[in-house]
Image (cartoon, rainbow, N blue to C red):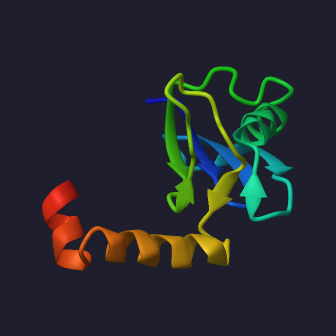
Amino acid sequence: MGIVAGLDSSSDSTRIVVCDTDTGAVLKQGYAPHPADSDGDPQAWLMSLGEAAAGGLLEGVQAIGVAAQQQGLLALDAGGVLVRPAMLGNNKRVQSAAADLTDALGGRAAWAQAVG
């Protein structure tokens, strides 16, 4: 296939690894941290991606696999505009808020029935 990249945007950083598919050799790597707080500006994640990919890191890449943080809340208004900083999974307030929301909707079974 040629040259591929793996991109991981975790709760603390963005990492990119570029590899040769024929040999498995790592050709290039990029890294940039995210701000160190449990509430974040999603724009900072985009800026981190730009920093990690700087200097033509993705030049010649034919495919990219992406992994990213999955435990987060982005609260948007009706126009799709962020209304508060994102709450990440490492923020303990998210856990209690999720439990409160589950209870308010009638418990786990009711939640599963409502959203699948």
Query: x, y percentage for residue 9?
Result: 64, 50
On screen, residue 7 above or below 70: above
Q: Residue sitting at 53 percent across and 22 percent down?
A: 79
Q: In the rendered image of this protein, does residue 114 appear above or below residue 41?
A: below
Report the residue at 70% width, 41% height from top. Answer: 42
Q: Is residue 24 left or right of residue 51?
A: left
The quadrant holding residue 12 is bottom right
Q: Is residue 10 visible?
A: no
Of 47 and 106, nearer the camera is 106
Say whether residue 36 is left or right of residue 101.
Answer: right
**Residue 39 at what x, y percent from top left?**
75, 58
The answer to whether 14 is drawn above or below residue 104 in the figure is above
- Residue 95 sits in which quadrant? bottom right
Among all residues in the image, which is located at the extreme front?
A: 104
Quarter holding the N terminus?
Answer: top left
Question: Could you tell me how many numbered marks the image carries?
Answer: 0
User: Which one is in front, 116 or 16?
Assistant: 116
Residue 52 in the image, given as x and y percentages of width and height:
79, 39
Tell me if 114 is positioned left or right of 96 in this view: left
Compare residues 105 and 85 and report the one nearer the observer. Answer: 105
In which quadrant is the C terminus drawn? Answer: bottom left
* Residue 80 place in picture, x, y as percent: 54, 27
Residue furthest left in the image: 113
Asked whether the viewer can see residue 46, the reply is yes
Rendered residue at 63%/20% (across/down): 60
- Kindly identify the residue that appears in the image at 61 percent across and 45 percent down: 7
